[in-house]
Each structure stands twice: as structure tokens, then as C-alpha cells.
Amino acid sequence: AQKIVIIGGVGGGATAAAQIRRNDKQSEVILFDKGSHISFSNCGMPYYIGGAVEERDDLLISADRFREKYKVDVRTNSEVISINRKKKSIQYKMESEIHEETYGKLILSPGAEAVVPNIDGIEETRTFTLHTIPNMDAIHSFIDMEKPKTAAIVGAGFIGMEIVENLHALGIKCTVIDRSEQVLKLVDHDMASIIEDHLSEKNVDIILNDSLASFSDHGKCLHLNSGKTVQADMTILAVGIKPNTKLAIDAELKIGNTGAIHVNEFMQTTDPDIYALGDAVETKDQITQAPRSFALAWPAHRQAYIIASHLNGETISYNGTLGSAILKVFDLTVGATGNNSTRIKQQGFTFKEATLKTYSNARYYPGSDRVWLKVLFDEKSGTIYGGQVVGFAGADKRLAVLATAIKGNLTVADLPELELAYAPPYSSSKDPINILGYKAASQIEKE
Ligand code: FAD
């Protein structure tokens, strides 16, 4: 038995605690979080705001319940402020008092912070980020009390997009502002333009290649760098996140090139008694092997399993991340796995691509709708570097197949051979993935 201290009690930290209990009933486990909620479903927050999730409680697990279920000493409202590696102890602040706790093994899962740019005229009562339950509650109660009619969403990444859909569901007219030339940089420009058309159909205004310079009129008027102005009763800033690395830096643990905590294949930092996981770490891109940091739930959960196994004496490696991500943008499903064109180019790879616009399933069967697929691959070996899918029914399935193909080291030449099952409500006798594979494989250079 050992004494395990975990910093951060949500995606990575709470999962690590639960995973440790899978095969270790003896060790003392203490879980710290600076907030008052642990193990909440951050991914569900946009949907509570929009009303698709009706009960706030459905996103939460009480600290008492977690304590009882996993026999973990949960300490909320307790911010860890320093790590003393020599003494193997941490200091934490609870109700403005400083306390100390020793550890045998320490696990860091402090996540990331939403970036709040320093903007003139920002009015905190009507400008929000969405990263925590208090953030969610603030947005929810603002909407309840103030009944906003218009909203500006700054940042068209995946959280920005989810917020747009959910505010729109409440009858709020949304304007999305992004400094790049497209929405959702997760996917390539051609795929993003399908999403932009869909947003326009839903009466969402999109302003690209422009950014927020300042606010006036008590935060209700946004001045953009182009000189344009946007009127909005509320603003959501979704311009990105920054990994929480202060504790690790102060403890002189290695920080990687991406600015996140460096870890080895067992998720150990440069101090073997300190593990780290989740949004705060960088891991290897499974395809390019370049260090990369991801803010996604799957890596955090897998890494929690790797750490719990390692603490139990099993050496299972974390084999890197593909960054498979999926989201709903109104009626569309958008997903990507592996690298997009921009990223693969940045990594110095040359590649070819195949794209396909087709139908999810037999056209004569009700519900059949468009689906767009894209695969990026090596022109000689056919190695798949990345896949992207935009569509309606069955888009998620095609993304899952592409992600599985990459993981299984299939090449584009293997895609036509995948026997993916057909009946008119689900597919066509050649699945869209098969056709994408034929198109890609025909481009592979013959020696
Ligand atoms: P978190 O879950 O953020 O937990 C970190 C915790 O550490 C926080 O509770 C924080 O209070 C605590 N903490 C930080 N510093 C200290 C300290 N010094 N002392 C004590 N406690 C501390 N991912 C997906 O894959 N799919 C999705 O659909 C999806 N949707 C999302 C929607 C939203 C709105 C958000 C915000 C995130 C979403 N994510 C999604 C991302 C996913 O939630 C994160 O990748 C995951 O939660 C990461 O887990 P983590 O433990 O690294 O960080």
C-alpha cells in the first residue's frame, strides 16, 4: 500500500482515482481540487446551457458519493500551491489556511485555463468563458435574468461552435468572430466551408479574418480590428486554453516544447514519483511522433488507466494520441482524426488527399443525407495521416472507422477491403469509406 495524492479532481484526476481503486483497495488516495465540484461532465456544460440537458445535477457527482464509492479522501476548495519534491509533500490552501500533506506518489491533473485576453472595456458581468461549473452557472443565470437577444462568440473552435448552437436554441441571435480564415481549424478549409454554409443557413453571422480589439458601451459593443463593430448583449470568449503548468514549473519538472508538462510513456514526469496527465501534458502525436498537447477526454481517461496500471506494477505504455474529435454543429456532425493538412505540412510531411461527397446510405431510404469525407495519406506507402468527416446520419461511424484504420496501421489501399455491413438504412453496398479508399488508392505512386 502507498499514499497517493492527486491534484485536480475532474477529467484526469477523478478518473485516475477510480482506476487506482480497480486493483488497489489498500492505498490511501487523496484527491484535491481547488473548485467545489469534482468529476463533473465538462463536455455536457454547453448542452445544459441550451436546455438539451435539463438537470444540472446530471452533470455532477457529489464529493460524498465519490468518497463513498471509491474510498477516496476528497478535498474540494483546496488549492495545491506548491510541491516539495525533497520532502515529498505538497502545500495546499483551504479557507485561506495553508496545510501540508505528504505523498508517496503524486499525480498532476490540473487541466488548463480558458485564455482571457486583456481587452479594453471588458465587462465581466456580460463576458464569459466556459470551462468550469461556476462559468456555466454564470452564463445560465445571466440568460435567465437578462434575457439576452444577441450574443457574440469570439473563437470558432469546438467549444465556440457548441456554444453557438446552444445559445441559438434559446432564440439568441449569434455572431461568431474568428481571426483565422475559417471556422473549426480542426478540419481543412474545404471541409470548414461546408460548416460555414450550414451556420449561415441557421442564421448565424460569421466574421472571419478579424479579431476583437476592445469593448465599449458597458461591454455591449465589440470593436474589431477591421473597424467593424458588433452589438451583443453577451459575449463568450472561446479563444483557447493554456495548460496549468505553474506547479510543475515551480517544482522544476521538465516542460516540453509545446509548453505542456513532459511525460514518458508511463506518464511519469522527470520525477519518477510524480505522474501527470490530461490537458496539462504533452504526448506524442501517434502518427508524426511530434510532441503535441490535446484537450480531449479520451487521452485523459486512457492516461489515467496507464498511471493506475503503472502504480500497480504493470508497464503498459501510452502509445500517443491521434486527437480524434467529434462535435455537433446544429444538424451537422463534424469529426477529425490524426493530422489535418496544415499540421501535416508543418511537420514536413508530403501527402496526397482524397475527398468524397456522397450519401450516408441508400438514397431511396428515408433519412439518407450527404456526407463529406477526406483522407490524407502518404503518396508511396498509403499510410493514413489523417481523416475528416462532415455530414448528417452516419458521419460518426465513418470517423470511427478512419480512426480505427489509423490505429490498426491500415493504409488507404486497405479501405476498399473493409467489409462494413450493408442494409439500405445504414449504408450502400459499397460504403463511403470503401469509395474513399478506391479514390485514394488510385493515387498511390507505383514504383
Ligand atoms: P480538467 O477536467 O479541467 O480538471 C482539472 C481540475 O484541476 C480542475 O477542476 C481544476 O479546478 C483543478 N486544479 C487545477 N489546478 C489546481 C490546483 N493547483 N490545486 C487543486 N486543483 C487544481 N473533450 C472531449 O473529448 N469531448 C468533448 O465533447 C469535450 N467537450 C468539452 C466542453 C467543454 C465546455 C470543456 C471545457 C471541455 C470539453 N472537453 C471535451 C475537454 C475535456 O473535458 C478535457 O480534456 C478533460 O476534462 C481534461 O481533464 P483534466 O483532468 O486534464 O482537466
Image: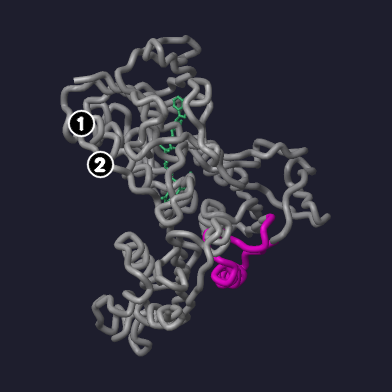
Quick check: 376 left or right of 437? right
Please tell me which residue is depicted at 16% across the width and 33% down the height of the picture.
Answer: 23
User: What type is the residue that disc 2 sits on?
Assistant: Ile
Which residue is painted at 77% across and 52% down in the image?
224
- Residue 316: mark in rendering: 2
- Residue lying furthest right: 227
Please determine whether, in this image, residue 382 is positioned above or below residue 1: below
Among all residues in the image, which is located at the extreme front?
A: 447
Q: From what the image shows, is residue 71 above or below residue 367? A: above
The range drawn in magenta is 179-207
Q: Which residue is mark 1?
A: 312
Secondary structure under tag 1 reads loop
Question: What count of labels does the image hold?
Answer: 2
- Residue 91 appears left or right of 144: left
Which residue sits furthest bottom?
364
Query: In this view of the protein, which residue sits in the foreground, 404 or 118?
Result: 404
Nearer to me, 223 or 441: 441
Task: Tell me which residue sits at (28%, 84%) in the image.
Answer: 424
